[in-house]
Amino acid sequence: MTGAENMEISLIGFMATGKSTIGNLLSSKLNLLFLETDSLIEKKIGLSIPEIFSKKGENFFRKKETNILQEIIQNKKNYVLSTGGGIVISQENRELLKKNTFPVLLKASPRVIFERILSAEEKRPLLETKTPLKEIKRLMEKRKDYYNQFEKQINTDNKTPEEIVRTIIEMIGVNLN
């Protein structure tokens, strides 16, 4: 790597756009710490994200999300951060990410997101509905203006994780040779 002092990269985007997969791969390529807001929240609270949503509610979760983000920014250096899909709802979070990290928005079409969620068989609290594809479209539309505040964007449809990581490394301007 070039002589970069600190490198804090955040991956933002809707659920199932590839943030965890890409984050893991990118952090190992750049030899950086990999952090995930959702995992850190689960560890701190002692409940899974679906349990937090059902027992304590979305507002409680969003407050914890902001607290975790603040802690990471204050206490960590040289990391790739995979954020939860709704972290952008908070203006404070958007500003923290823009000011303190190199944010990259990962995007995917509603259909691809739906297929990824189905194949992963993960519980997604916000999609516990009879019409998950419709809910994906509704939530994406609701968050669109927040996501579009981030300049660096990559559509992950029909791209391999390696291709996406290469694109991010080029965006950052790191030479791995």
Image: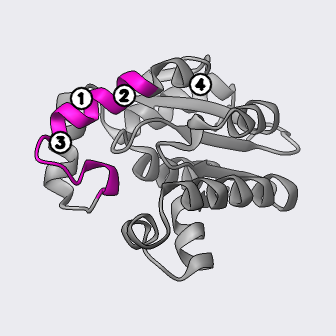
Amino acid residing under circle 2: Met
Q: Residue 21 location, x and y as percent?
A: 40, 51
The residue that mark 3 highlights is 132
The mark that comes first in sequence, 4 or 3, is 3
In the rendered structure, are the residues bearing label 2 and label 1 in contact, judged by CB atoms less than 8 Å apart?
yes
Q: State the residue in front, 84 or 36.
A: 84
The label number, if any, that marks residue 170 in the structure image? 4
Question: How far apart are the two marked residues, 4 and 3, measured between alpha carbons?
Answer: 35 Å
Q: Going by the image, does 22 lie left or right of 33?
A: left
Outermost residue on the left side: it is 130
Q: What residue is drawn where x is 77% and y is 43%?
A: 7
As shown in the figure, which amino acid type bears the numbered disc 3?
Pro
Which mark is nearer the camera, 1 or 4?
1
Percent across and percent down for residue 122 are 25, 62
List the residue tagged with mark 1.
110
Residue for point 88% across, 44% down: 5
Label 2 to label 3, Cα distance in Å?
Answer: 12 Å
> Which badge, 2 or 4, is on the more N-terminal residue?
2
Q: Which residue is mark 2?
A: 140
* Secondary structure at numbered mark 1: helix
Q: Compute the Cα span from label 1 to label 4.
A: 27 Å
Spatial CA span between label 2 and label 1:
8 Å
Local SS, label 2 = helix
